[in-house]
Amino acid sequence: MATNHGVGSSNLSGRAINVITHLPLAMLVAYSVRIPRTYSGIMRFLSIFVLLALVVMVPNPALAWSQNGHEIVCDLAFRQLTPAARNLLFKVHDKKGPFYKSCHWADEVRYDNFKGTYNYHFLNVADGEDELDFARDCAALDCVTIAIQRYATILAREPQSSRDEENRGDALRFLAHFVADLHQPLHVSHRKDRGGNDITVTWLDTSNKRNLHGIWDTTILSESGARSVALAMPLLTRIQNMDVSMWRTFDIVGWTAETYQLAEMVAYTHENGTRVITGDNLPLPYFERARPIVEQQIMKASVRLAYLINQIAAGNLPRNMLVLNSPGNIDGRIRVE
Ligand SMILES: [Zn+2]
């Protein structure tokens, strides 16, 4: 899942690790190509430098945990689609490669082509408030909950032009991404600490400093063993063994409230009930409580994403899900253009 509310420090450390892990490989490549001895000293130095830079720039998939969470949700969801939903997906999904490969795209475009979607990745509870109030905290109608309804509705519309077809491709990718984001507890959390990005802790008694948000985006999932789509496959069997009928709802406001409860009870809270603050260490018992939550949220997101696409393909999407389920005074103002 994506780093929320801005780029966290984990990206910097990831780049640093990238350099370190690739360095021996780069040196081997530089040595093996045998730079001609006729090159002057400076030319030899520059050639080796360019080779090192090229190798370091190769993406290291083992470090792309944020991307990993999104890909796992999409892959598991794809395996739960009805034949009609798969047909819809194949028609609309216009990018090369498997569907799950497109599920991180929304994080890549939120800084440029789709700047207007930046706030769609999360929902913040207002400063000074402990309770989630959907009408207050999503008053600008630009939170993740609204985004799910918006893109589900666009996907459900019969296209009238090639532009509509293109929009449906984008809507599918946004929908898939935001359903996953909504299930990361710290994507429905507090503005005052930017969803845990401003809480710096150490992890499992090491001295490595990390931000709490990054731990929930990447660390817990990767340390649970689900380091790739292939390694996450056992989660599919576990979904089938669970009673998922309770998860299959159109109550996106209810999904949001559930996630916030997990943020409050688990992500922001130590085993002894005290609040996680900057400078704390998160020991093994924290991981042991968090791991089943992360796994369940990944499974739940995949079930709900598949449910939405299945219902859209069957023509069963309610006209306005949020109006059906939203509490408070926001109901009358929701419009999906
Ligand atoms: Zn995101």
Image (cartoon, grey):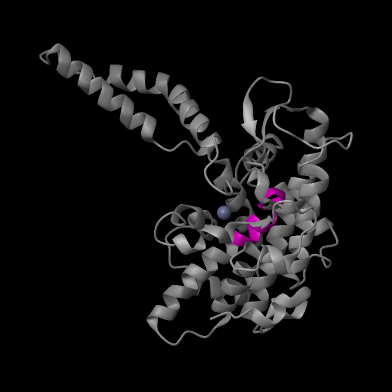
Determine if residue 82 is in view. Answer: no
Q: Where's residue 10, x and y in %?
A: 55, 35
Name the quarter showing ligand 1.
bottom right
**Magenta-colored stretch includes residue 178:** yes
**Magenta-colored stretch includes residue 337:** no
Residue at 67% from the left image edge and 36% from the top image edge:
199
Determine if residue 66 is in view. Answer: yes
Q: Vertically, is 226 above or below 161? A: above
Q: Which residue lies furthest to the right in this view?
A: 272
Return the residue nearer the eye: 321 or 100.
321
Number of residue marks:
0
Return the residue nearer the eye: 6 or 47.
6
Q: Give the range drawn in magenta.
A: 177-187
Return the residue nearer the eye: 240 or 54.
54
Q: Vertically, is 281 above or below 27? A: below
Q: Where's residue 296, x and y in %?
A: 77, 51
Relative to residue 137, is residue 154 drawn left or right? left
Prevailing SS of the magenta stretch: helix
Q: Where's residue 180, x and y in %?
A: 64, 57
Q: Vertically, is 266 above or below 122? A: above
Q: In which quarter of the image is residue 95?
A: bottom left
Q: Which residue lies furthest to the bottom in this view?
A: 160
Q: Which residue lies furthest to the front in this view?
A: 128
Residue at 74% from the left image edge and 34% from the top image edge:
277
Q: Where's residue 336, x and y in %?
A: 58, 79
Q: Quadrant of residue 9?
A: top right
